[in-house]
Every structure is written in C-alpha cells, then in structure tokens.
Amino acid sequence: MITSTQVTTGKVRISYEHLLQPYANQPGAEPKYSATLLIPKSDTATKAALDAAIQAATEAGIAKTWKGVRPPVLPTPIHDGDGVRDNGTPYGDECRGHWVMTASSKKRQEVVDLNVQPILNASEVYSGMYARVALNFYAYDAAGRRGIGCGLGPVQKVGDGEPLAGGMTASEAFGSPAPAAFAPPAYQAPPAYQQPPMQPQYQQPPMPAPVWGNSDIDPITGRPVAPIAGL
C-alpha cells in the first residue's frame, strides 16, 4: 500500500551507488545501503511528488516525532545541483540541471531490471546508470537534530549511462593497438639438433713381443731368468 510519504521517481541517474554492499560514510558509523539520485529539473512531476511526500512527512513529524512543534529550520534531503553543498563547495558537473538527494536503508533493497527481475550480475549496477527508485520520507529527531530523511526502497534499472566512478575502458587505458615497444618478439625456431662428435675409444697399447735369446731379463715379467743350458 502506497502512503502519502512514499514516492516512485521518474527516470533518475544514480550516483555514489551502494545498492549491493552497505557503506559507512564515516569511521564508526553504521554501514547502510544507499544511493544519491540526480533528478532532472525538467521532470516537474517527480519534483512535485517529492515535495508533497516531504510535506506529508513534516505533518506526521509535527503530530508524533516532534510532539506538536515544527522545527524552525527544517532540513530536507533535496538539494539544488546548480548550487553549493553545505560546506560551500559546488556540486560536480554531473549534478548541473538536477535536484540532488541521497536515500539510504539498513536493509538491502531489491534491484530489478525492466522486467522486474532481480539483477544478478553485480557489474550491471553502478554509478552512472539510470533507474526509477521507490522512496519513503520520514521525520527524525536524533542527537539533537531534527529534520526530514529519505528511506531507500526498491530500485529498477531502466538504462545504462556513462560511469560516474572515474573508470575507463581498456582501450582508453592502454590504447589500440599496443605501442611497438610492447610488441612481442618475432618467433625464432631453435637451432637443429646436432649429434656431438664421437669420442675415440680407448685402445690398449700392443704387448711387446717377447725376445728370446740369451737375455737375462724376461720381457714379459721383467724379471731375471735363468740361462737355458746349452745356449
């Protein structure tokens, strides 16, 4: 059931996307699922619906959260992308011509495609894509601060866009084709195998022929021999 504080936007652009993994803006803060929405100022129907929902949340806050007292200064989550942030710095170029707001949730919300089927490929969900987003506005009173917050509901991706995360394509990063200095060396076939030269086999030197006669030395044993009688 849709209440007076709930809105489904028209086509908006997603920035600072944390739809699939929770994120903490500050150390020690509770991680939440969140996204910043860039709402074209030309979409007057969505802006009117957002204003009406914020007014309904304000009335509910006066009746319940703030106990009958409207805060004199009531912060709301919608900001002018053609202006400056609370710290005085201008919004990024992608915010020009848009209303800027952030929605968050402690629970992970559904992220679906045009056929309302869950998107299973995480790479299809990124900062820069276009979507329709369900929102719920509420009054808060925490740590001495009062205002209107925005809760994140289901998200329907309706189109792709240029990534806003500072990424680049492979061709942008490396060029095409690769510089000659990085070209692989030309293939060279290894030299043909050659049989190493055969080493000459050892040959035992010839045995000297015995010399028989009146020699006193046996040429075989090298020992003295006794003379043969009659020689």
Image (cartoon, rainbow, N blue to C red):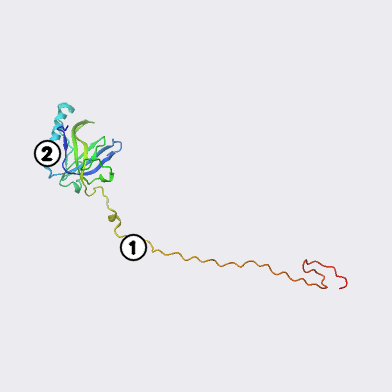
Give amino acid for label 2.
Ala
Q: Is residue 14 above or below residue 6?
A: below
Within 10 Å of disc 1 (Cα), the crowding (few <14, some 14-19, many 20+) is few
**What's the residue at 26%, 38% (across, down)?**
33
User: SS of the residue at dot 2?
Assistant: helix
Q: Eyeballing the image, is 197 above or below 71? A: below
Q: Mark 2 — residue? A: 48
Residue most extreme to the right: 230
Q: Residue at x 19, y 48 (%)?
A: 94
152 left or right, relative to 211: left
**Residue 15 picture location, percent across and down:** 22, 44
Outermost residue toward the front? Answer: 230
Kindly identify which residue carries mark 1.
Answer: 180
Q: Relative to the observer, which residue lies in front, 79 or 104?
A: 104
Q: Which of 65 and 201 is in front in this view?
A: 201
Rendering quarter of residue 111: top left
Q: In which quarter of the image is residue 20?
A: top left
**Badge 1 amino acid:** Ala
Q: In which quarter of the image is the C terminus?
A: bottom right
